[in-house]
Amino acid sequence: MAAPRIAVTGRIPDAGFELLHEAGDVVAWDSLDVPTVNEVHEMVAGAEAVLTLLTTKVDDAFLDAAGPQLKVVANVAVGYNNIDVAACARRGVVCTNTPGVLTEATADIAMALVLMSTRRLGEGERVIRSNTPWQWGMFYMLGSGIQGRRLGIVGMGDIGQALARRARAFGMTIAYSNRKPVAPSIETELGAEFMSMDELLTTSDVVSINCPYSPTTHHLISSRELGMMKSSAHLVNTARGPIVDEAALVEALRTGEIAGAGLDVFEAEPTVHPGLLECENAVLVPHLGSATVETRSAMARLAAHNAVNVLNGVEPPTPIPVPAI
Ligand code: DGY
């Protein structure tokens, strides 16, 4: 029997290739630039397994281009809003993602953004780098302390919980909203209080978005929600850009409706709303949540493991739940 064709639609760390090369004939995109849709479609034609990055759109056109022999789409990301999972399920294509291995790295970036936003570190760095004259002063560039302040976590999955652990170590108290409360043992460990989204928004000093993106979380944070937040509060988003209505956020940052924001993700990545670029009180970093050498290798390895298991007829370690179709 011919070895299965395995396509990889973006550059991934070498760790990902070890298993893949043993399992089939690998064709991999070998540039740091994102391939065009046509280039992706050419690459996946005839593949039985495809490893995709979050910049690869997996829709009916992709599935048509791949062909009926396609068995698995293994996303090298935990978020999978780039994949039409229902369309894959209709064609019997298994989808997988990479939860777990990027939890700590992403929680680190969320905590870093909490600190950067509340302590105005982006602004401070810009002063130095632009050679703007400055002088230590009792009232110079004051931020707000986070000890004893409430962190409201929207989405208490693995990353939300890992962020809560970090924030507790910084003396913050934890509130969260989620589809349902987490296990009582986790609530106790984190000292976390479950509450409605509205209560969380009105009472938190920092609100962190840690839920997945889906049609139900599209613009979950818009003018109404920003208007409910304290004027001293900060918003942090390390999940997916379109969960926050960026135009509404720009308005809230401009008018002082909220004090600041720390964003790792954007509505139309890699484009950033021009209004955000003008807001001194916005810390903006380019989707670095999982960007450590160790984490990216672990993600690639897990995605390869998922793909190879499906090719071998074995349950993959981290399948994406199949939606009802
Ligand atoms: C993911 O895996 O979904 C992250 O956003 C990648 O950084």
Image (cartoon, helix red, strand yellow):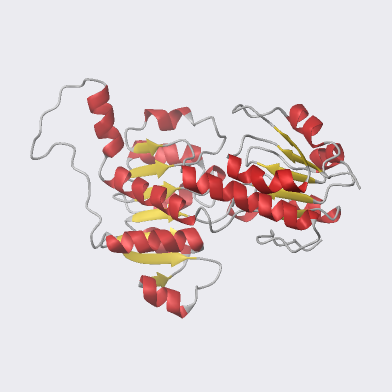
Q: Where is residue 13 in the image (x, y as percent from the top left)?
A: 58, 40
Q: Position of residue 191 (x, y in %)?
A: 35, 72
Image point 31% across, 43% down: which residue?
Answer: 116
Image point 84% across, 40% down: which residue?
Answer: 66
For residue 289, say whether it is visible: no
Residue 46 located left or right of residue 162: right
For residue 221, say whether it is visible: yes
Residue 19 located left or right of residue 294: right
Image point 84% across, 47% down: which residue?
Answer: 70
Image point 42% across, 38% down: which residue?
Answer: 251
Residue 206 located left or right of residue 53: left
Locate the C terminus by quadrant. Answer: bottom right
Q: Position of residue 97 (x, y in %)?
A: 64, 53
Q: Indicate the quadrant where residue 261 lies.
A: top left
Q: Indicate the quadrant where residue 313 lies.
A: bottom right
The answer to whether residue 33 is above or below residue 245 is: above
Q: Position of residue 192 (x, y in %)?
A: 38, 70
Residue farthest along the bottom direction in this orientation: 184
Residue farthest along the left direction in this orientation: 138
Seen from the viewer's position, the closer of residues 56 and 224 is 56
The answer to whether residue 287 is above or below residue 104 is: above
